[in-house]
């Protein structure tokens, strides 16, 4: 049994994880953290971290970058595994997360969907096969309440493609201000915000007379919640270190 503290318990992702975990006999959410206490769910929710004295194995964090230090410090103090699902982290916060992996097991992925991580793997293979004769563009679509742009997932896709090409690509986010032809060594990233779109990502390889598109569509937040639960199971009992979705996928 994996005992979990759920940070961001009252948010939409927290509610999805709570619902799915209730049907999983191998996981128990023992308490939660959020900006307000709540007595209407099946476990206690604390807004003051110092008041939490409940034993657990792993923290799943689906809160906000402003809460990053609270969660990380608590995980280090209690020597708990940390599944960091919050998006929009700054480079400095990412560096802190990496450093913490020397003390505790840390699991981080820009997107908790298994499907998205399959897309990244397929995109890397496509880039290696198609070579520089194909231009790469990434389009991401999300709901109108999303704050960061482009999405962390779109950047993770771009980073994976760029790393496979010895970091030879430049990222271009906006072309309206510059009147010139597209450079061969660029990856275009485009953000769409509207309605209640959960998360769509398209990686376009555009060549002469043919276009290859690899797409992922998330129909509900359950795909991310399921990924977070799988990550918590995976991280439980692991030694200190930095783990990613590729580690989880390879363990299946």
Image: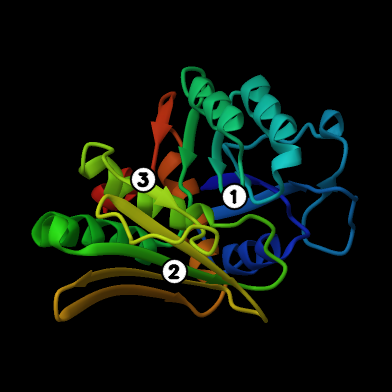
Q: Nearer the viewer, residue 230 or 247?
A: 247
Whether residue 86 is visible to the viewer of this picture, yes or no, is yes
Query: Residue 61: x and y, percent?
Result: 64, 46
Q: Residue at image x 56%, y 32%?
A: 91
Q: Which residue is mark 3?
A: 170
Q: Is residue 66 left or right of residue 246?
A: right
Q: Which of pointers 1 and 3 indicates the residue nearer the eye?
A: 3
The residue that mark 2 highlights is 139
**Residue 107 percent coordinates (x, y):** 47, 39
Seen from the viewer's position, the closer of residues 230 and 68 is: 68
Q: Is residue 230 visible?
A: no
Please rate how many residues cluster around mark 1, counting C-alpha atoms within 10 Å: few if below 14, some from 14 to 19, many from 20: some
Left or right of 97 in this view: 119: left
Mark 1 and mark 3 lie on one chain; the one further toward the N terminus is 1
Circles 2 and 3 in contact, beta carbons < 8 Å:
no
Location of residue 108 with respect to 94 vertically, above or below: below
Kindly report the distance in space between the C-alpha atoms of the residues bearing marks 2 and 3: 16 Å
Q: Tell me the residue that label 1 is attached to.
A: 87
Q: Give the residue displayed 52% in from the left and 52% down from the top.
A: 152
Assign a secondary structure to mark 2: strand
The residue tagged with tag 3: helix, strand or loop?
strand
Relative to residue 51, is residue 3 drawn left or right? left
**Residue 101 spot, x, y in % from top left:** 48, 24
**Local crowd at mark 3 within 10 Å, few (<14), some, or many (≥20)?**
some
Point out residue 195 in the picture as x, y percentages from the top left corner: 67, 81
């Amino acid at each position: 049994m994996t005992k979990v503290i759920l940070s961001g318990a009252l948010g939409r992702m927290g509610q999805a994880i709570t619902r799915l975990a209730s049907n999983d006999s191998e996981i128990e959410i023992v308490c939660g953290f959020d900006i307000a206490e709540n007595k209407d769910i099946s476990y206690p929710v604390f807004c003051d971290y110092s008041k939490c004295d409940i034993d657990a194995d792993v923290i799943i964090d689906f809160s906000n970058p402003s809460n990053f230090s609270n969660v990380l410090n608590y995980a280090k103090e209690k020597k708990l595994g940390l599944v960091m699902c919050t998006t929009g982290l700054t480079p400095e916060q990412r560096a802190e997360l990496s450093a913490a992996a020397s003390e505790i097991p840390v699991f981080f992925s820009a997107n908790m969907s298994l499907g998205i991580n399959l897309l990244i793997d397929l995109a890397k293979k496509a880039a290696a096969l198609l070579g520089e004769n194909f231009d790469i563009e990434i389009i991401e679509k999300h709901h109108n309440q999303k704050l960061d742009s482009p999405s962390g997932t779109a950047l993770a896709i771009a980073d994976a493609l760029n790393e496979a090409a010895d970091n030879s690509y430049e990222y271009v986010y906006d072309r309206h201000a510059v009147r010139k032809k597209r450079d061969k060594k660029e990856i275009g990233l485009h953000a769409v915000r509207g309605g209640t779109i959960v998360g769509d990502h398209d990686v376009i390889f555009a060549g002469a007379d043919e276009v290859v598109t690899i797409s992922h569509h998330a129909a509900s937040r359950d795909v991310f919640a399921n990924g977070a639960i799988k990550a918590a199971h995976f991280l439980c009992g692991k030694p200190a270190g930095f783990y990613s979705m590729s580690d989880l996928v390879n363990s299946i």
